[in-house]
Amino acid sequence: MPPRSEPVEMAAATAVEGEEESVPRRRSVEAEGDQLIPGLPDEVAEQCLLHLPFPYQPLARSVSSAWNRALSSPTFLRSKAEAAAERSLPYLFVFAFDRATLRLQWQALDPRTRRWFVLPPMPLPAGGDGPLCPPAFACAVLPCRGELYVLGGMRSDTQFPLQTTLAYRAATNSWCAAAPMPTPRCFFSACAIGGRIFAAGGGDGGISAVECYDPAADKWAPAAGMRRGMARYDAAVVGRRMYLTEGWTWPFDSSPRGGVYDADRDAWEEMRVGMREGWTGSSAVAGGRLYVVSECGDGRVKAYDEGTDRWRPVSGSGVPGDVRRPYAVIGGAGGAAHEGGRRTIYVVGSGLHVGVGTLADVTTAGATEETVEWEVVKGPPAFADLAPCNAVVLFA
């Protein structure tokens, strides 16, 4: 079914809370010699425009024809992409669906102002002219380039997997179709390593082939296949290694399966026993550390200790009660260095209420333990019927 959203003019992000954005007044560029900013050299003005957050770029294009040309030029877009991590700010992007209609929507939250923006409607994937199953898609992100990718999927009526590759670029606030995946997939894992997207597993676990997408070339290529196929439960990337687990399955009488892909060696290995048996929830990577938010109880957080192959509990409360399942979990992009030394995880729940967990190491009486403190960013009433199926963080 076609995704619907609030009206968007030229792919403009729209404020959800009903607040009217103040549109900059048009200036007489003829009087100023067509300068971008009167009194400043254009090269200095362009540096100023590089700091403009993505939701306001459509408004800025309406200032003058000179601004429109500058913001749309390939040189500016290339500079914006190259400087994204340094000059842009992290936004939380949420892939959600209406529980009654299965309508798909993408929203973006500015964690600083706590304002939501609606993204342009995502194009229908090829073969997706029937009803779509929202959780069947996989999402991957290149955060420092401001790019996210929506992959695969499944039609709800036929249960046929799809070959979708859709790309969103924050620099232009727009979607485009990319080269389709060679293997149709649903309920699979997709992760980014070194600027490339890897798709692995899927369906009922019968797909062992792994494929790698190069965004620069818009091409897919085979990667080392898994020893055996796996259905998706959860996946995470730490460094240049992708961790993929099927999780516990009924009747819970055998250890869950898990694999680890080493991108430098293009090879798979078995996941360690302690890691796969303790991986009982949705993962987040923050500050180079792997965390899991438990799918049971009150959503306690635990961290993986590679040295001991054990999961240790993180002190503090579980996910706040205002954030109700289903969860979409993600760690703050770029590690602790981009967040003032803090480690942050986001837990998006029903109605798009967001639990923001701040993790820190606390030393008491010579002993150090990790703690988490929560705050909640409540979704607006218009999101009451939405449920998240994926969340990513990228700089925009």
Image (cartoon, grey):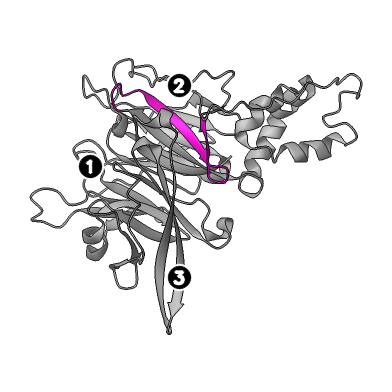
Residue 379 higher or lower than 253, as above or below: above
Q: Residue at x 66, y 38 (%)?
A: 80
Specify which label sits upstream in the sequence, 1 or 3.
1
Give the quadrant of the N terminus.
top left
Please tell me how crowded label 1 is: few (under 14), some (14-19), or many (20+) other residues with Cα within 10 Å.
many
Specify which label sits upstream in the sequence, 1 or 2.
2
From the top left corner, tell me how far across and down residue 275 is, in percent: 27, 62
From the top left corner, tell me how far across and down residue 57 is, in percent: 65, 29
Q: Nearer the viewer, mark 1 or mark 3?
A: 3
Does the stretch in magenta take in 27?
no
From the top left corner, tell me how far across and down residue 270 is, in percent: 25, 58
Q: Residue at x 63, y 39 (%)?
A: 81
Q: In this orientation, does residue 191 appear?
A: yes
From the top left corner, tell me how far across and down residue 235 is, in percent: 33, 49
Taking depth in this image into account, of 73 and 56 the one nearest to the observer is 56
Instruction: Describe residue 165's horizontal placement relative to residue 334 as left or right.
Output: left
> Three-letter amino acid code at disc 3?
Asp
Label 1 belongs to which residue?
231
Residue 17 higher or lower than 188, as above or below: above
Does the stretch in magenta take in 111?
yes
Instruction: Describe residue 308's horizontal placement relative to residue 95 as left or right.
Output: left
Q: Which residues are magenta?
A: 99-118
Q: In this orientation, does residue 241 appear?
A: no
Label 2 belongs to which residue?
5
Taking depth in this image into account, of 355 and 134 the one nearest to the observer is 355
Please tell me how crowded label 3 is: few (under 14), some (14-19), or many (20+) other residues with Cα within 10 Å.
some
In the drawing, what numbered circle is on residue 139?
none
In the drawing, what numbered circle is on residue 361?
3
Mark 1 secondary-structure assignment? loop
Mark 3 secondary-structure assignment? strand
Marks 2 and 3, how far apart at CA: 42 Å
